[in-house]
Structures are given as C-alpha cells and as structure tokens.
Amino acid sequence: MADGGRYYNEHDDRTAPFPSRKGRGHKNRSFDRRDRRRGGHPGGFGPGPRSRLLDDTDGDVTMSDSSQDSSSQNRFTPYVRPSRKPDGRFDRRQMPGGRGIPGGGGRRERSVRNRLGWYKVTIPHGKKYDKKWLITALQNICPVQYTPVQYHVDHNRAHFYVEDSAAAGALRKCSHKITDSDGYKVELHVNPSNPPSFLQSDLKPEQLEHLKQCMAKRFDGSQQALDLNNIRTDPDLVSQNIEVILNRKTNMEAVLKIIEENIPELACLNLSNNRIHKLDDLADVVTKVPNLKALNLSQNELKTDRELDKLKGLKLVELWLSNNPLCDHFKDQPAYISAVRQRFPRLLKLDGCDLPPPIGFDVETPTAIPPSKGSCFGSDEIKALILRFLQQYYSIYDSGDRQPLLDAYHDGASLSITTPYTSQNPSRSSLGEYYKDSRNLKRIKDSTMRFRLLKHTRLNVVAFLNELPKTQHDIASFTVDVNTYTNTLLSFTVSGVFKEVVVDGKSRESTMAFSRVFITVPAGNSGLCIVNDQLFIRMATTEEIRKAFVAPAPTPSSSPVPTLTAPQQEMLTAFSLKSGMNLEWSQKCLQDNEWDFNRAAQIFTQLKAEGKIPDVAFIK
C-alpha cells in the first residue's frame, strides 16, 4: 500500500500483532547506511552482481518467482550485527532471528509474498485518469495477458491487483511507457501483496459469536458506550486464536454489523489504538449508527484530516484524534480545531478539551427561503426619476447609434467593465467580446493596466460603448436597488438580461445577464447625469434564460400612440386612468385582448397581482 511515497507491505506494523518499536535510534540508521555503502543489502547479505541487479532504486521489488538461497529463510534483524567470517564476510548461517523493521520486509517476507501469487499495481496520480482508458492502454502494451482485479482509487492514486508473477513483471516494465493527454508519462509501481480484501476469508460464524460476546462485555448500557480500544489483544479473543484487525475491511464490517443489529442506539464508540490508517471501512457508521455523539480515534495511524471527510454525516459533539500523524500537520491549535470543525460543526470537545460554542444556524427543519423581492427605490419620487432615466438610456443604448448617450454622461465621467474570472479560454465563450476589456481585479494585477482599462471622460466612455456589440435588453427583467440618495448624489444598481444583435438583425442564441452601478448627480430640472458607470456582464442562468423575453418589450418611439379610431382612443384613455399604466402599455394590453375592455382589465389585475408587469409600464 502506498502512503506518501512509501510503500508498505501487508505485514507491516499496521497489521502485524505486537510490533517491536525498539532500536529506531541514530545508531541503527547509521548501521543501515554503512551496509548500503558496502554494496550489500541491509543486514549483511554480501555484495555481488546478482544482488545489485535485484536492487531497485524506486522501491519496487523483483517480479521473479525464483527460489531464494538458504539465507532467505532467516528473518532479517537490523538491530543485531551479524558475525563475520575470518575473511571479513558475513556468515549467512549465523543471521539472528527476530522481527524486522516494520514495513521493511526481509527476503523471507518477499519469498512468502511471491508464493501467495498476488501483486498490487499502484499508479501515482491515477485518480485523474479514466479507468477504461488506463486499463486499455496498459493491456495494449503489456506483452502478458492479465485481468485487473478490484480497481479502485485511494486519494490521488489508483490501484488494482493481478494474480500472476509474469504479468506483474511485464506491468512493471510498462512504467513510463504510456504518455497521457498532458504529456506526462504514466508511472507504475508493482509490489507483492496479500489477496484483495474481498478474497480474504471472513470471520467464521463461531468466531463472530465470540466477537459478539467480547463486544457485549465491553459495552456499557448505562452510557450507551462501546469500548473497542486495542480489540485485537482482548484475552477472550486471543485465547480462541481470533485476530480482529480493524484496519481490515471484513473485520470492520463485522463489528459495524454487530453494532447495527444489537446496539443501534450507540452514542459513544472507542476505536483507539487499533492501527486504523484509513476511514473508508468506517464510513458506514454514518448510516448504521446515526445517534453516535462521541468517537475516539486516538492512538491510530490517520495521516491526513481528509480522512475525516468520510465521516462528515456524523453529528459528533466529542472527538479524540490525539497521537495520530495528522495532528502534526497543523501550524497551531486554532488551525487544527478549524479543520476538524469544518467536518463536525457541532463539536464541543476535541481530544478531551472543551471548545468554544460553535457559531452557526440550526437548520434541522427544512426552511423555505423567502422569495426575492423586486426593486427597492425608497420613495415614489426617486422611483419615477430612475425609471424615466432607464427608459431613455436603454432606448438609445439598444438603438443602432449610441452617440446620443453623450448627454447622459458628465464631462469627467469614468466607466469600467468586468466579466467573471475564468481559467478557460475566453475566446470560446460568448463573453469573449467583453473579456479583453475586463477590469477584473482578480485577473489584472498590474496597476498600470488597471488604470488603462478605466475609460475616462464622456467622449472616451461613449466611444467605448459604441464599440461594444449591439444589444437588446429585456426591460421587463430589470430590477433596481437604490444604494445611496442625497440632494446632490444618487447611486443605484440595475440588473437584468440582454442578448446581442448582429448586423442582419438576428439575435444570438446566448442570453447574458448584467449588473450595472450608476453613480449620478442632478442634471437640469428633473434629469440625471452619470459620473461613474460600473458594468458587470456574465452568462445568464437557466432560470434567467427561461424567463427572458417572454413578451416583447414595446418599441420606444417619439409617437407612442398611433392613429386610433375614436372609440379606441376613448377606451385607451379610460383604461390608462383605471390601470395607472402609461398609454403605450395600456394600448398593448388592449390590443393583446382584441380591444375587450373587461377581459383586458381582468388580465391586467391578474398579472399585476403576480408581479409580472414591469415598473416602466407605469411611467407617464
């Protein structure tokens, strides 16, 4: 198994009982290095051409099933210096027994592994590859046919197993032979392994019964607490030669099944000191033990806080993680607490220490978000002023010539345009026309460029607006929010949707949304003059597109009321007085209802109650 670049075999100290922790000091490391400088294996296997050929610098082992010499039958013990023969060579026959370095694995271990016949293939960064592409590419270049077993992804690595030493050796030679779409060579590591977890024998029925009895003794009904600390050394299990290793999938599943069937109301679970290095097999606790409030995972081998993501559904109030490698990865205690609380926001105790109460909102019961409100003007006077301004501004903006907008801007006006920050190629987006002039401060870091992208003076502002694509705005989609209002200044934001119009008069398929902040000052008796204009453009959402341009907006004209018959003119005036709409929108409503006054009045009342009539319809 790969962990941070190191490869552990299945007999390392995460799975072997009672590991030796002695002899890890400076002296032992020096001894190991001196042996390597002599060209031999650690422990004194003498140098020779074959031993050098078998050594591999990248940590993979030889894929040969060839038998080892007699020295391989002794367990490698790095803590005892082997005796030497008179000629200075190590005496292989006098190699002492004992435990090896956890995870190191001597030749005897490798021989056992080869006899098991299973090999684990690991692809660093394999998560980014499509499984079908990767397996097919490997099978195409591998000279030995093989069947990948239990393909899975662990963090950024991909793994699978093969049950053939010849295939394992051939796959090892395939490393760096495949080039991915980014131009990188695909790297492979092949190591002897135990059989895949699904092939490992489950606990037998009588062993499960002993385990169940053992767990019953460790259960405290008054506290709804189960203590499985160092369960593998429990005397009741050891006396029956039952080995329960909770970093094995089958064993963890058996424990969770017993909990689910017998104590589903469990509130406290202690899994400390069980050499658990991954939480994948514990993830089912979220659904099987939903009332769990306290969990002890201390004295295990969890290497990263990302493992906690697999338990995020638990509503824990107490958690112990002390003496796990992951605790050393944080610069300080607040960072540690913050990372844990991101996964368990209700946590009140961490490693036995009280935490400050969490800040948040209790949203256990589904709460409907209130519907968004329409425009906010502050007063009817400001509303009339802004709506009249917007109607005039966008009737010119959407016309063929934007030059008349000079009258809308102050001599010292400034304008900027912004589009969303994206790492994709902007030329492929409908926003490409606007991207080149975007003053998004997240993208533009240079102060000189930021200044250049500001358009200064009304001549430059209107000249720039004339260069932008021709548009058609959906006036009915506009919402207005007044930000600031004084006697000398009025700032407001207008948002809505629009689409571009090409030269032949056809509109593009894409609909865009905009938000525009106008900062204005009084002009004339009842007008506004723009001193600052900030335009933000993005692609419209699906919902915005669905609602856009449902009814065509009336075309502005200098004579909004065409020649009508006398009865129609009389009906129009009466309808405008009753509805409050201007003549243009009143006429549209009557025309849509074939000049049926009562039906038009009914439709108007219904649409007004639903908020579907835009504010501009009431500007007179």
Image (cartoon, helix red, strand yellow):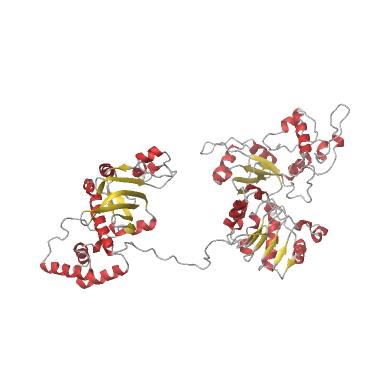
Q: Quadrant of the C terminus?
A: bottom left
Q: Quadrant of the N terminus?
A: top right
Residue lying furthest bottom in this view?
598
Please give the name of the residue rendered at 58% of the width and 62% of the height, measured from the top-left corner. 357
Direction from residue 386 to residue 329 in the image, left or right = right
Direction from residue 537 to residue 503 in the image, left or right = left
**Percent coordinates x, y for residue 268 in the rendering:** 68, 64
**Is there any visible trace of residue 398 in the rendered image?**
no
Q: Is residue 285 above or below residue 454?
A: below
Q: Is residue 210 above or below residue 277?
A: below
**Percent coordinates x, y for residue 588 in the rendering:** 21, 63
Q: Quadrant of residue 209?
A: bottom right
**Percent coordinates x, y for residue 558 in the rendering:** 16, 55
Residue lying furthest left in this view?
566
**Is there any visible trace of residue 15 in the rendered image?**
yes
Residue lying furthest front in this view?
487
**Percent coordinates x, y for residue 521 in the rendering:** 27, 53
Residue lying furthest right in this view?
86
Q: Give the number of marks.
A: 0
Q: Quadrant of residue 50?
A: top right
Depth order, front residue of 132/543: 543
Q: Is residue 412 above or below residue 595?
A: above
Direction from residue 207 to residue 532 in the image, left or right = left
Depth order, front residue of 269/580: 580
Q: Quadrant of residue 237?
A: bottom right
